[in-house]
Amino acid sequence: MNRNHKTAYSFIVLLFISCLSFAQQTKNENVELVKKQNGKRLEFFAKNNDSVSYSVFLRIETEDYRRSSNRPVLQVISANSETHLITLIKLSDKPGDYKEQFIVNKISQSLNFRKDFDDIQINIDEALKTEDITIFESENCELCNEAKSLFNAYQIAFKTKNIKEDQQKLEKLLKKAGQADYNIKNAVFLLKIKESIYTNITTKTALIDTINNYNK
């Protein structure tokens, strides 16, 4: 890593910590730091049991382990997932002592999302937060990720289903919604809110328009 990259990374870390000073949580009931020992290897994972994503910060201070990375770890942990953060390998002549700093924060993704969408006005109807919402997604779908980021940023609960794996269920839902003629084979992203299925959302602008016009 060259000097410019190191400076940029240091700035990002400092900015992240500064932001966390307003909403820092060393403990969180939904996100936990999981440690797995395998011989000399000690692996750290962040396990998210919530339906929204969180940002985590992990710093390990030790002279007893060799690390896969000497830098603090900044990572977004997706909903209902377990993500590897760092691996430590114990040195033969050391007792295995270390200090950890683990911070969980839910505002980081929201800030990043609003930065990406700062050119679009978003008006979330509070009723949307209590609706039954499902995102039907496909592989490598950028719009699917943007939709999940939007809902996570505004704390809107949702479920995700894979279009191919849940094709039969989706076909039944489309038939029930009066859209039996829809060609599901070409589907990339579908959004279900209550009994309505939105099949024509192909851009982030269309996604925002759908959300803004909900209940109007």
Image: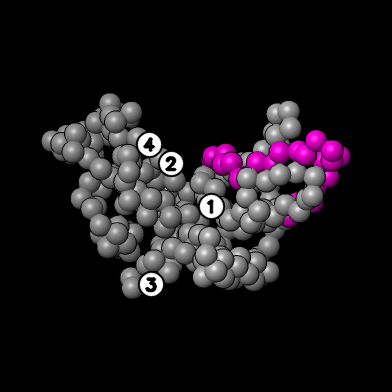
**Quarter of the rendering containing residue 95:** top right
Q: Which residue occupies 20% across, 35% down?
A: 184
Start-end of magenta stretch: 80-101
Asked whether the viewer can see residue 30, the reply is no
Q: Looking at the picture, how far across and down is residue 106, in whole percent?
A: 58, 58
Q: Which residue occupies 33% across, 70% down?
A: 120
**Amino acid type, label 4:** Lys
Q: What secondary structure is marked by label 3? A: loop
Mark 4: few/some/many CA within 10 Å (<14, 14-19, 20+): some
Judge from the rendering whether residue 83 lies leftward or rightward of residue 67; answer left or right: left
Tell us which disc is closer to us: 1 or 4: 1
Image mark for residue 159: 2
Q: Which residue is mark 3?
A: 118
Q: What secondary structure is marked by label 2? A: strand
Compute the Cα span from label 2 to label 3: 26 Å
Q: Are marks 3 and 1 in contact (CB under 8 Å)?
A: no
